[in-house]
Amino acid sequence: QVQIVESGGGSVQPGGSLRLSCVASGFTSDNYALTWFRQAPGKEREGVACINNSDGRIDYRGFAQGRFTISKDNAGNTVSLQMSSLKPEDTGVYYCAARTFSFPTTMSRSTMYNPGSYGYWGQGIQVSVSS
């Protein structure tokens, strides 16, 4: 059973930085993807960035490109999201999600950022950006 534990988050002023971490365990192969999602109050959950470990690809949504960096440590299954130049519109609950594949698989972006594509979720952590 895949388990996900998130940490990090908090409150920061606009222009500041935060780092989120996601420890994912229980994978039975290297064929999995880990994606950060976020949900602002009153809005739908949206994808932020993805690491597909099965094909080695990394992807960002447009609003995250250039400001956020997703990375995975080689030793374990920790995926981090380094967020810089934060804006008030980045406020929300951030979730780490995982899905597995039977074999190496390249996902379309529509699949990658569809919350329904993921079967495992963390508890979510709050990120607040305000002055």
Image: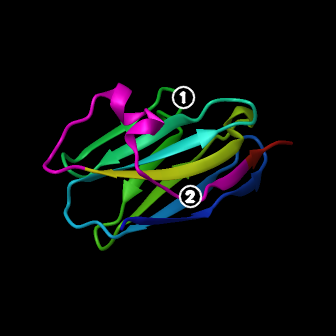
**What's drawn in magenta, residue-wise?**
101-127
Q: What element carries label 2?
A: strand
Above or below — where is 34 with respect to 61?
A: below
Q: Where is residue 72 in the image (x, y as percent from the top left)?
A: 36, 59
Q: Which residue is drawn at 46% across and 30% down?
A: 61
Q: Where is residue 12 in the image (x, y as percent from the top left)?
A: 76, 51
Q: Where is residue 124 in the image (x, y as percent from the top left)?
A: 62, 55
Residue under circle 2?
20
**Disc 2: CA contacts within 10 A as few (<14), some (14-19) or many (>=20):** many
Q: Give the CA separation, mark 1 to mark 2.
A: 17 Å
Q: Which mark is residue 87?
A: none
Residue 114 lies in quadrant: top left
What residue type is disc 1 on? Answer: Phe
Q: Which residue is drawn at 70% across and 36% down?
A: 40
Above or below — where is 27 with respect to 59?
A: below
Taking the view exactly as shown, the residue that stands out farthest to the right is: 131
Q: Which quadrant is home to the N terminus? A: bottom left
Residue 116 lies in quadrant: top left
94 left or right, relative to 65 = right
In the image, 96 versus 102, the foreground residue is 102
Residue under circle 1?
63
Q: Which residue is drawn at 53% across and 38% down?
A: 67
